[in-house]
Structures are given as C-alpha cells and as structure tokens.
Image (cartoon, coloured by chain):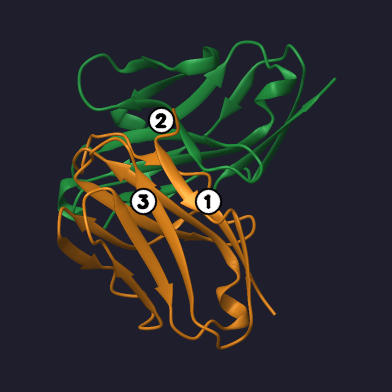
Amino acid sequence: AQSVTQLGSHVSVSEGALVLLRCNYSSSVPPYLFWYVQYPNQGLQLLLKYTTGATLVKGINGFEAEFKKSETSFHLTKPSAHMSDAAEYFCAVSEKNAGNMLTFGGGTRLMVKP
Amino acid sequence: DAMVIQNPRYQVTQFGKPVTLSCSQTLNHNVMYWYQQKSSQAPKLLFHYYDKDFNNEADTPDNFQSRRPNTSFCFLDIRSPGLGDAAMYLCATSRDTGLYEQYFGPGTRLTVT
C-alpha cells in the first residue's frame, strides 16, 4: 500500500528565503508524484508532477521538485519565498496497484514572514 | 472560464436533514471525484465516477451517496448529516486516472447545526 509522509506540518520562512517542503513516499512500484497548493477556502491547484523522464521537475510560481528514487523522496523547493506563497501544500502519489487514485500526505502549512 | 464549479460555496444544514451538494465541469473529463476535507487535514476520497461507473471507497459511510446524471454534473447526497460531517467537500475531475492532473473546484463548506 502506498503512503505519503510530509515532514513538518508547519514551516515558517522569511520573505526571500529558500523554501523546502519535504515529502517521502512508500510504494511498491515507482509512483506518479504530485504537489498541490491550497489557498484558504479554495480547492487544490497543481504545482507540478513527476511521471517519467527528467527527475527535476519545474512547476508554476517558481517551484520545483526532484524525484529521488533511492531516497523515496519528492521534496519541493523554491529559491526565494514570496508573501503570496503562504498556503497549504500537499504532496500526493498515484500508483497503479492502488487503482491510480491519489493518496495525499498530511499537508504542510507554509508561513512567510515579512 | 471556470472549469469545475461547486454550488453552493457555503451550506448550512440541520442535524439529520438531507443535503445535496452539486458539482459541474466544463472540461468534458471522464472522471469525477468527491473528497471530504476536515480542518487542517488532507482531502479524503469518498468516491469517484469513471464515466458512469461508480467506485466507492471502502471506508465511505453509507450516509454518503452520489449521482452522476451526465458527463458534466455530479451530486453528493448526505442522507442524514451528523455533526461529524461538517467539512469542506471538494469536487475534482480528471481526463483519466493515474498520471493525469486532477482539477479541483473551490469546495463547499458544510456546517451542521
């Protein structure tokens, strides 16, 4: 069975600082990996995804993530945080053995200090 | 150019009074999903439709039902809401499952009094 762990339910950074949100997964086969962002009282929006090919994936709003199979990780980064990045971030995996449904991590709330 | 629309955005219902939440999409996607999201938690999949085929998650309570009369519309029916059913309900669509992106609506926040 697949599962997703996001280390740190809350992360606080200063504006302009590096953003690093951690995601580790367990899966019996290489899964598809996603990062979604959720602003207050809104639905989720896809930031980026990894399916196959290049392991460094670039997404919207300056975010990127790297798939590291040996570490079963898919951490999300952004070089310089902006106030508008404050939101909830969810890592998710989709695995064929699990019916291709998304399994979400618990989420990380990113706070950006001025 | 809204793609996944949920109505209403906020719904208040009384304990035990049936309520229906609606979702429509303009993407012509095959798959529609309903998620329940409680405060500070990840979305939890309740069920999904692949075209007309209904797929219920094993732990979804019988109190929750769904209808998909056509490609564009999907409804979530809560037959007898309890206080524990207060949550944000998210509808999502995707062209197919697996590697395909899910497009989420803005959600309906349900309050049970």
Who's green, chain-wise? A
Q: Quadrant of the C terminus of chain B?
A: bottom right
Q: Are marks 3 and 1 on the same chain?
A: no
Q: Tell me the amino acid under the disc marked 1.
A: Gly
From the top left corner, tell me how far across and down residue B41 is, in percent.
57, 56
Residue at horizontal 33 percent and vertical 34 percent from the top: A33
- Of helix, strand and loop, which one carries label 1? loop
- Of helix, strand and loop, which one carries label 3? strand
Query: Where is mark 1, residue-wise?
Result: B107
For the question of whether residue A92 can be seen, the reply is: yes
Q: Earlier in the sequence, mark 3 or mark 2?
A: 2
- Depth check, front residue: A70 or A99: A99
Relative side of A68 to A11, left or right: left
From the top left corner, tell me how far across and down residue A83 is, in percent.
74, 21
Image height of A88 relative to A79, above or below = below
| CA–CA distance in space, label 1 to label 2 | 27 Å
Residue at horizontal 23 percent and vertical 35 percent from the top: B99
Name the image quarter holding residue B14: bottom right
| CA–CA distance in space, label 3 to label 2 | 14 Å
Q: Which mark is residue B87?
A: none
From the top left corner, tell me how far across and down residue B76 is, in percent.
39, 67
- Depth check, front residue: B43 or A7: B43
Query: Where is mark 3, residue-wise?
Result: A103
Chain B, hue in figure: orange
| CA–CA distance in space, label 3 to label 1 | 19 Å
Residue at horizontal 59 percent and vertical 53 percent from the top: B9
Q: Residues within 10 Å of mark 1 (few under 14, many from 20)?
A: many
Q: Tell me the amino acid under the disc marked 2.
A: Phe
